[in-house]
Image (cartoon, rainbow, N blue to C red):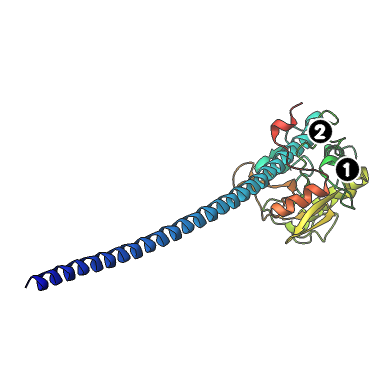
């Protein structure tokens, strides 16, 4: 009986150690699984951090590029305003107080009686309209050179010449014209059958407006032959080309700026508009190509220009 009791105790002790071994192996296995799990989690989190940092870096880069593009577009708006104010200053000296600026649309506006009166489409020597178109020719020839290019795409005037202090009509914005449109507009009065006196082919407001714009351009060209040699930048998709800056268009009665039925409305609608369109880069890549073309290293911040 004693031998059996001892054998039973030994068996219980052996079972106990076997159970403890199994438990330890199980715990070790669980521990290994946990370690592997945590290692994988750390790697996943590290990968996420890298991805996040990369994405943030990309977003910061895109924001920087977008900011620079927006900044340049702001500069083009500033340069257009300076051009318009420069052009208007010539007329102020000659006493043409009716000439207006529409800054939001980039327009220098000549209402009825400045360049043409009702039914007129030509210039008579010695008249106020002849003086007005002569003033326009001088204004374009003097104000635009720092904001346009030559036929080969080079600056019409050097960057050094176009700095503030070197010329009254400078271009510290490094922004350039795409086109300058001389636009003819009329009121809604119907042209009488048989056309206008002096040219029976002018039998519609559209033809009349186009003739007024064309005659204005041709007189400017005669008075200041350098004006047709001004070129601007234009985009066709991502392709940038150099094209003549001065263009002519006629709109007839299609684009009124006042109600023709109100007093003075017709007078406002009978007008010549000189519209300044600035070149806007297609994207950041186009901006960089433009700056390289013009010999500009980067977009300068306003504080960089002080002094």
Depth check: give the residue in front, 282 or 143: 282
Q: Tell me where residue 197 appears, x and y as whole percent.
A: 83, 54
| Mark toward the viewer: 2 or 1 | 2
Q: Name the image quarter holding the C terminus.
A: top right
Q: Is residue 241 visible?
A: yes
Residue 90 marker: 2
Badge 2, how many Cα within 10 Å: few under 14, some, many 20+? some
Q: Residue at the far left: name it.
A: 1
- The alpha-carbon separation of the residues under discs 2 and 1 comes to 21 Å
In the image, residue 10 sits, relative to residue 268, either above or below, namely below
In the image, residue 287 sits, relative to residue 90, either above or below, namely below
All told, the count of numbered labels is 2
Q: Tell me where residue 39 appears, x and y as whole percent.
A: 45, 58
Residue depicted at 78% across the width and 32% down the height: 89
- Look at mark 1 in the image and give the residue it sits on: 124
Q: Tell me where residue 288 appears, x and y as whole percent.
A: 75, 50
Q: Secondary structure at mark 1?
A: loop
């Amino acid at each position: 009986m004693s031998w059996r009791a001892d054998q039973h105790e030994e068996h219980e002790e052996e079972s106990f150690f076997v159970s403890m071994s199994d438990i330890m192996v199980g715990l070790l296995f669980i521990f290994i699984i946990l370690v592997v799990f945590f290692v994988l989690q750390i790697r996943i989190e590290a990968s996420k951090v890298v991805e996040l940092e990369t994405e943030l870096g990309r977003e910061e880069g895109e924001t920087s590029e977008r900011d620079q593009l927006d900044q340049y577009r702001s500069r083009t708006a500033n340069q257009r305003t300076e051009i318009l104010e420069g052009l208007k200053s010539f007329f102020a000296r000659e006493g043409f107080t009716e000439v207006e600026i529409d800054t939001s649309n980039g327009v220098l506006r000549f209402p009825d009686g400045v360049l043409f009166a009702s039914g007129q489409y030509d210039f008579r020597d010695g008249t106020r309209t002849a003086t007005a178109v002569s003033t326009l020719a001088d204004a374009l020839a003097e104000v635009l050179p720092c904001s346009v290019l030559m036929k080969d795409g080079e600056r019409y005037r050097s960057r050094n010449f176009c700095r503030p202090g070197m010329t009254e009509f400078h271009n510290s914005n490094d922004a350039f014209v795409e086109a300058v449109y001389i636009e003819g507009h009329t009121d809604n009065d119907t042209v009488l059958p048989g056309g206008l006196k002096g040219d029976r082919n002018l039998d519609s407001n559209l033809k009349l407006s186009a003739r007024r714009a064309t005659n204005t351009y041709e007189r400017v060209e005669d008075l200041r032959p350098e004006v047709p040699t001004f070129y601007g930048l234009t985009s066709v998709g991502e392709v940038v080309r150099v094209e003549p800056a001065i263009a002519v268009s006629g709109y007839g009665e299609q684009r009124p700026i006042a109600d023709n039925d109100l007093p003075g409305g017709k007078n406002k609608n009978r007008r010549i508009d000189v519209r300044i369109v600035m070149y806007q880069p297609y994207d950041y890549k186009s901006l960089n190509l433009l700056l390289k073309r013009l010999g500009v290293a980067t977009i300068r911040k306003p504080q960089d220009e002080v002094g």
